[in-house]
Amino acid sequence: MLSRLGKKKKTLIVTISALFTLQASFSSTALAGDTLPYAGSSATGLNQPTQHGYTANDILEWEPETDKDAEMLRSRVPLQERNQAFTPTQANPALSPETQMFNLAGDYGNAFMDSTAYTNKFGQYTFPYWQYVDYYSYWHGMASADVPKDLYNPSLPWYERWFEFGVLNIPNPAYTNAAHKNGVKSLGVIFFSSNDRGPQTYTQMLVKDKDGNFPVAEKLIEIAQYYGFDGYFFNQEESSGVAVKDIPTYKEFLKVIRDSGLYVQWYDSVHNTTGRTRYENEFTAVNSPFVKDSKYGDLAHSIFLNYLWGKQKMENSKAHAESLGLNPLETVFAGVEAGGDRFNKHRNDLRNNLDSNGKPMNSIALLGSDFTHHGLDEDLGGEDTMRRSNSDYQWMSFIRDRAWWTGPNQDPTNTGRNPNVSLSDVAAKGDNWDGVAAYIAERSVIQGSNFVSNFNLGRGLAYYVNGKVSNPEEWSNINIQDIPVTWQWWMETSGTPLQADFDFGPTYNAGQRYDYEKVGAYNGGNSLVVNGTLDAENFLRLYKTDLQVKEGSKFTISYHKTSQDDSSVMSIGLIFKDNPEKVVKVEVPQSGKKTNGWKTANLDLSKYSGNEIAAFGIVFDNGGQEKIENYQVNIGQVKISDGSIEKPKAPTGLQITKALRDSNEMYISWNLNDYDDVKQYNVYNNGAYVGGIYDEVFYIKNLKGLSGEIAVTAVSQVGQESDPAVVPYDLTKGVHNIKANQSDNGDMVVSWENPENLQGKITVDISTEYDYAKEVNKSVTVDSGKTEAKLPKMPINGDKYHLKIKIGNHDWVSYRGTFIDRTIEAYPAENVTIEGTSVTWELPEARDWHYLYVYENGEAKTFNTTYSQGRKPYIVRGRTHLNELTFQTKSTDSILEFVMVDYSGNKASTVVRITMDDLYSVINGLVEKEELTISAGERLTDTLMTANQHYHGDRVKQAVTHLEKFKEEIDRNQLKEVSEDTKNMLKASADYLLKTWSN
C-alpha cells in the first residue's frame, strides 16, 4: 500500500480493528426516540424478517428476488374506499370534512435494524387514530441492507451511529395494511440530507439512461407496486441545495412518479430559481413549481410547508394555490412540528389557518405525532430510558395519544385548549394544543351491510379466542388491528359520565386514573371496558358508519358484565341517516345481570330494514335505580350482519417452507384468496394462536413444540372462521445443532446431531437466497448415522444460503446462513474524475463496501464526517460528509490510490494516477527498505522498462503483454516478504498503466 512506499513519506497504516476500538471508546446513552433492540424473549428472532433502507444504487438494482425477506414484507390489503362525508354525525358538525391530514410519523418504533411486521412485544406503538388521517408516511430511518448489526452500539449517543442509512425507507407492510383498511394512503420517504445520509445525494437518483428515461424512478414505481404502498414523500434537504441545472431534471423525475398513478408530496425546502435549500413557510412562486410547473405541468400532488407560518402566510398560500387552479385543501399542507413542540408552546398556531368565518384555508401536516409513545422517556425524564416499550407504561401512551388527537379533554366534542386539565401524570398539559379533532373531521370506511369489531388495537399481553387465553405471550401485530373506535371518547349523559378504556387483561397496568376489574379480550388483545357510577343514561358513541339495514340484519354483541345484578339496561344505540338527531335504542335482554364470563346477544334489526345506519354506539341506563356504584361491563365484540356472508372455505396449499428447529422458528405459506372473501388468515400452532395476516406467507417466531401441527383458518368480513387447513410436523425426527464451517477455498463442512433410534439416508440440500452473484443448488446424500457432509467449492462472496437436511422421508429441518466473504472487487477507476488538483469520486456500487482509503504519495487523505465528528483518515460509508464528494490533492502529478475495504475486511487497491517513473521509485524504495530483494527488484524493473520501450515504440500489444507479465511476477515467491497491500498496489498501478495505454 502507498502508505508504506510513497515518494517521500512513510505513514502509519490505520487498521480496521483500530477504528473499531476508537469508536467503542466513547460512552453515552442512545437518543430517547430510538427504539433500542429488544432483549430476552422479545429480541428479534435469528431468522425473523426485517426491513432495511435503500441507497440510490440499491433502488437502481432492485429486484424482489434479491431483496432480503421481500416476499415476507409485502402489504396485500387493498386501499378501502371511504364513505361520503355526513356532517350531522360528526363530533363537530361545523368542521369541514374537506380538510386533509398528512401524518409523517414512526411506525411501531424507530428500530434501525430490527423493523419487523409483527413480534412478541406489547410495548410497540400501534397507531389507533386512522379516522383523522388521509396520508401516513413513515419518519423511520433504517440502515441499508448489508450493514452488519454489530456496527450499531445502542449505548453510544446518536451521533455515534457509524453506519449507513438508506435515502429511501419504505412503509412497514403491517402499517400499510392497517392504513389501507381505514382508507389511508401509505407513502415511502425519500430523504436527502448532508448530515443524516452522509455522501448520498439526489444526483445519484436523477441519472438518465441512453433513452432519456429515469431507471431509478422506474424502480421506485416497481417497488411501490410490489410492496403495496401508494406513493412517496420527497424531503430534499441537502445543505448545498439542488444545482440550478438539475432543477428541470428533478421536475421530470417527479413527473414520472406522479404519472404512474402514485401519490407524491414535496417538502418546502428548495428554491425553484436558485436551487438553494430555503424554507418559504408558505406556498409561493418559489416552491409551487415543484407542485405545478408552467413547463412540466402537474408534478407533486401536494406540498408539506415548513413550520414558521402565521395567519398572513396561510392566507397567501390559499390565494397562491387558487391562482394556479389548485384546491388548497388538497394541495397545501401546513406543517406542525408535533414531535418537536409536543404539548408545549408551538411555533405556529392552527387557529391561524382559519379564515374570518372559522373555515380552514389549507390542510394540515404533522411531523412526529408518535411522540405520544416514543417520547415518553424524554418527557418523563429520569433514568429509565425504555419506558416506551415497557408494558407498565403503555397506559400513559394511550392517554397522551387521546390528548393529542381528540384534545386535552379527551373528548372530540369538547376540543380546544384547557390549562386546567390534569395531564401531568403523563408528562403532558392542555394549554397549548387544541387536539387534531378540533380541525379534522373524522372519516369512516364502514359501509355496506356487514361489519364486525373486537376493538382489537393490534397488540396485547396475551391473545384471546372466544374469551379464553389462547396464547399467553405478549404481542404486537397491527395487521390484525380492527377499525378503531371513531371517537375516544364521546359519552353523552346528563349525569356522571362513565369511563371507557381498553382492557388488556389481569396483568395490565391501567394507571391510577382507572379502577376496574381486568377481564381481557374476547378476541384479540383487548376489550372495551365501561365502568363507574351509573346514575343517568350514558350513550357511548362508537362508530361512524354508512351501513344498510336489510330484512335479515342482526346486531350481535358479546359482553361480560362483572358488576353485580342491578336494574341497569344496556341497549344498542342506532342513529339513522334520515333522522340523525334521534338515537334508536335496541335493548339487550337481561343486561343488568352479572354474567358468568362472556355472553352473546343477537338482536333483530329487521324492523328497521331500508334504513341507513349513520352511526352507532351503546346506551347504558340505570333503569330507575337512583345510582349504581361500581358498574362495569366489558364489550368484546359488536357485529352487524345481514346473513349474506357465508363461512369461508379452508385455505388451500398450506405448507411448511422452512422449519428452523435450532432457533424454534418456522416459515409457512398457503394460497391467497380475494380480500372481498377473506379479510385475514389466522395461524395456530398446537392449538395456540400465533398470529394473523392477510397474506400468503407467515413467520412463526416461537414454535409451541417440536412436533404437532400448524393450522390456518380463513376469516370472513364478519369474523367467521373457516375450518382449518392443517399440516403436521415432527422435528424430533430431524437433525439438530446444525453447524456450517467453510474454509477459504469455499469447501464447506456441514455437521449436525441425529435423533436417537432413527435410521435412514440423510439428504443435505443447499441453495442460495437472494443471491447476487452465484446461484447454488446442490444436494448430497450420506449414509444413515453420519453427522456431517462435505459441500465443496461453495461461494466465498458473502451471499446468503438456505440449508435443508432430512432423514429418510421425515421432515426437512432448515438452517440459514451466509457464505464466508473472501472476495472483493476493486473500486472502479472510472468512478474518479480528476481535473488538476480537484478529485471527484462516486460512491462504490459494491453492496458491502465499508471504508474507502485515499492515499496521495502514500499519505492518507482525511475527510470530514457528519454531525461535526471531525476528520477521519478514510471515507466511511454513510458518515463521510456530502461535501467531501470532491476533494483537493496537493499537486497535479502525485500518486493517487484508492483502497476499498468491505465489511469482512477484504481490501482492493485502485491506482488512479501514477507515472512509470513513479512506479520505478516505488520498487526502488522497497529494495532500499529490504522488503524486496535486489534481484527481484531488478526483474520487476526490467519488465517495466521493456513494457515502456514497446509502448513508446507504438507496439502497444507487446507493451500490454509485459505489463501482464509484471503482474504475474508480483505473485511469485520471490516477493514473499512483500505485504499483500503492497502487492495489490503494484498490480493496481500496472492496471492503471494498462488502461491508460489501451486508450
Image (tube, grey):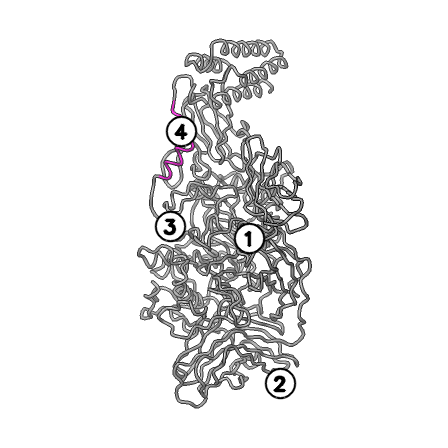
Disc 1 residue type?
Glu
For disc 3, the marked residue is 31
346 and 938: which is toward the camera:
938
Q: Which residue is mark 1?
A: 665
Above-or-below relation of 67 to 875: below
Q: Earlier in the sequence, mark 3 or mark 4?
A: 4
Q: Work out whether 526 lies above or below 965.
A: below
Residue 323 circle label = none
Give the residue furthest to the front: 757
Mark 1 vs mark 3: give the one in front: 1
- Residue flagged by tag 4: what amino acid is it? Val
- Is label 4 or label 2 in front? 4
Give how far across and how far down residue 199 sits, in percent: 46, 38
User: In this figure, which residue is indicated by the disc labeled 2?
Assistant: 607
Give, as a three-letter code, the residue at label 2.
Answer: Lys
Image position of 797 (left or right of 111)? right
Residue at left offset 68%, top offset 50%: 809
Other residues around mark 2 within 10 Å, as few (<14) / some (14–19) / many (≥20): few
Q: Rounded to the nearest whole Å, what is the CA distance between mark 1 and mark 3?
A: 32 Å
The kind of secondary structure element at disc 2 is: helix
| Residue 20 is covered by the magenta coloring | yes
Q: CA distance from mark 4 to mark 2?
A: 83 Å
Q: What span is in magenta? A: 11-24
Instruction: Name the disc covering residue 14, or none.
Output: 4
SS class, disc 1: strand
- Badge 2 or badge 3: first in the primary sequence: 3
Mark closest to the chain's N terminus, 2 or 1: 2
Q: Residue at x 61, y 73 (%)?
A: 450
Q: Is residue 605 left or right of residue 423?
A: right
The residues bearing labels 4 and 1 have C-alpha atoms spaced at a distance of 41 Å
Secondary structure predominantly adopted by residues drawn in magenta: helix
Name the front one of labels 4 and 1. Answer: 1
